[in-house]
Structures are given as C-alpha cells and as structure tokens.
Amino acid sequence: MLKGKTAVVTGGTRGIGFAIVKKYLENGANVAIAGSRQATVEKAIEKLPEYKDRVMGIWPDLCSPEEVAAAFSSVKERFGSLDILANNAGISSRTSLYDYTVEEFSKIFDINVKAVFICTQAAARIMKEQGGGVIISTSSMVGEYGQPSGCGYPASKFAVNGLTRSLSRELAKDQIRVNAVAPGVTRTDMLDALPTEMVERISAGIPLGRVGEPLDIANAYLFLASDLASYVTGLTLRVDGAAMT
Ligand code: NAD
C-alpha cells in the first residue's frame, strides 16, 4: 500500500511509533525512525534486520527547526522523497493542577505541540516542492474529553486536533493531507507495567471490552497514509473501542 513512499515516524523507537514503523515497512515504504537518542534509534533498527535497506535513523532535537530541517533533508537525500510524516512522539503526566509547575506545562507543550508544528513545517516545505504528501499526528481520546488530572496533556492534544483541522485547510492547495489518530488506552510499556487486575478493570470499562493494541493504531495510520484515504483530510480518527476515559 505504500510502495515507493518514504515516511518519517517521530517517537518511532517503541510503543505505538514502533508499530507504525513496522506497518509502514511491511507495506513497502522506506522509513526514517526519529528518536530522542542515537542509541535507542539504533536499538530499534536492530530489531528490523529484514528491512535494513529501507530503514534509517535520525535523532534531531524536535524543538529545533534547524536540526529537524537538516534531518528531514538527509531522509530525502537517502530515499529520494519525503511523502509521509507521522508526528507521534509525545509525553504525558497526571500531575494535579495544584502541583503543576510552569516548567512541566511547557515541557509537555514543547514535545506534544511545538515539535508537531516544527516537524510539520519542515516536512510540508519538502512535500510542497514534491507536489504533495501526508501528515498524521497522534492525538488522544483525552483530546476530546479532557481528563481529571494532568491538564497540560489533554490541552496539548486539543491543540494537535486544532493544528490538524487548520493545516488541512491551509495545505490542501499543495495536495498535502493532514489528519490525526486519537488512540484510547493502548497497550505500551506503561500499561504492561500495571498489575493484571488493573488492566482487566480498565478493559471492562471499554465498550469493546479490551484495551487497544499498538497494531490497532498502526492500522489506522496505514489507512490514512495510503491512497485509500485520498479524499480524507482534517480528520481526527478515534481508535478507542468507544472508550470515554
Ligand atoms: P511511549 O512512551 O512508549 O513512546 C513515546 C515515544 O515518544 C518514544 O519513542 C519516545 O522516545 C518518544 N519521545 C518522547 N519524548 C521525545 C523527545 N523529546 N524527542 C523525541 N522523541 C521523544 O508512548 P506511546 O504510548 O507509544 O505514545 C505514542 C503517542 O501516542 C504519544 O503521542 C501519546 O501521547 C499517544 N497516546 C498514547 C496512548 C496510550 O495509551 N499509550 C493513548 C493516547 C495517545
């Protein structure tokens, strides 16, 4: 479904991002894994020996426009194009408002919003010149419902949805589609660290009766990146089993 396309996946070293990387590689794309550290990026690439000719690593500071632009140029140089950007890197916290520091709030917004803006701008400049592309960001179900603690995280995902809607309208003339995927509770390292009974309790509260798997999210990412979604832009696609936090 993505043969000949090139994707950058931020936060691609583990969890949902690594599932997107694998899904894109299985479907024929070249993939650049963007992580925060060279060591973790290289470790992730080691897990994909069968794709070594189609995968590379980059580790720019996602809040530095210069580093991101240079890294994305190196991807285009290696594979000939940059067609898909998955803005997936993100951090969360559950700190109460009374204890929330400005520093913590800024840190969440730096990686969850500012980095999405910077990466999208750098990728869109390349995509415009190429004649089009696809940008997809990882939002969250809490970007619709909020959550009863850690207000910076849901606020950052509302901002991701806002960027998605606005940029889909601004970039349509350049044939760049802009969408988001909003996962519900998804099984990553953090969830695996919880006691089984707690995961069972969480699952019971989800109408589909289970938590999401990274593959559920990666499948949505595949659809939105592919030509099957050629007329879909400005969408935040919920992939949450009808959960409502
Ligand atoms: P995770 O912690 O396993 O992965 C996060 C990824 O982001 C890692 O690869 C990490 O290296 C990367 N990252 C974090 N800070 C970075 C930085 N400064 N620079 C570069 N990379 C950085 O978590 P995950 O659950 O796989 O999260 C992926 C995305 O999904 C996030 O945007 C998160 O908000 C969103 N999400 C997750 C869930 C869930 O239940 N797991 C639910 C809704 C949304």
Image (cartoon, rainbow, N blue to C red):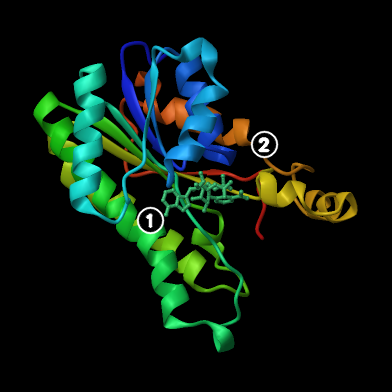
Q: Is residue 168 visible?
A: no
Up-down relation of residue 237 to residue 46 (above or below): below
SS under mark 2: loop
**Left or right: where does residue 136 sit relative to residue 42?**
left
Look at 51% across and 60% down and name the residue there: 144
- Indicate which disc residue 213 carries: 2
Q: Which residue is mark 1?
A: 160
- From the top left corner, tell me how far across and down residue 202 is, in percent: 79, 54
Gap between marks 1 and 2, in whole Å?
22 Å
Q: Is residue 222 visible?
A: yes
Q: Amino acid at mark 1?
A: Val
- Indicate which disc residue 239 carries: none
Look at 56% across and 55% down and name the residue there: 141
- From the top left corner, tell me how far across and down residue 1 is, in percent: 42, 13
- From the top left corner, tell me how far across and down residue 82 is, in percent: 25, 27
Q: Residue furthest bottom?
A: 98
**Left or right: where does residue 56 sit relative to residue 184?**
left
Up-down relation of residue 150 to residue 99 (above or below): above
Residue 115 placement: quadrant:
bottom left
Dot 1 or dot 2, earlier in sequence: 1
Up-down relation of residue 150 to residue 217 (above or below): below
Q: Amino acid at mark 2?
A: Glu
Out of 129 and 63, give the one closest to the viewer.
Answer: 63
SS under mark 1: helix
Look at 29% across and 32% down and name the residue there: 134
Q: Residue furthest front?
A: 39
Look at 53% across and 14% down and name the residue there: 49
- From the top left corner, tell me how far across and down residue 233 is, in percent: 32, 38
Mark 1–mark 2 CB contact (< 8 Å):
no
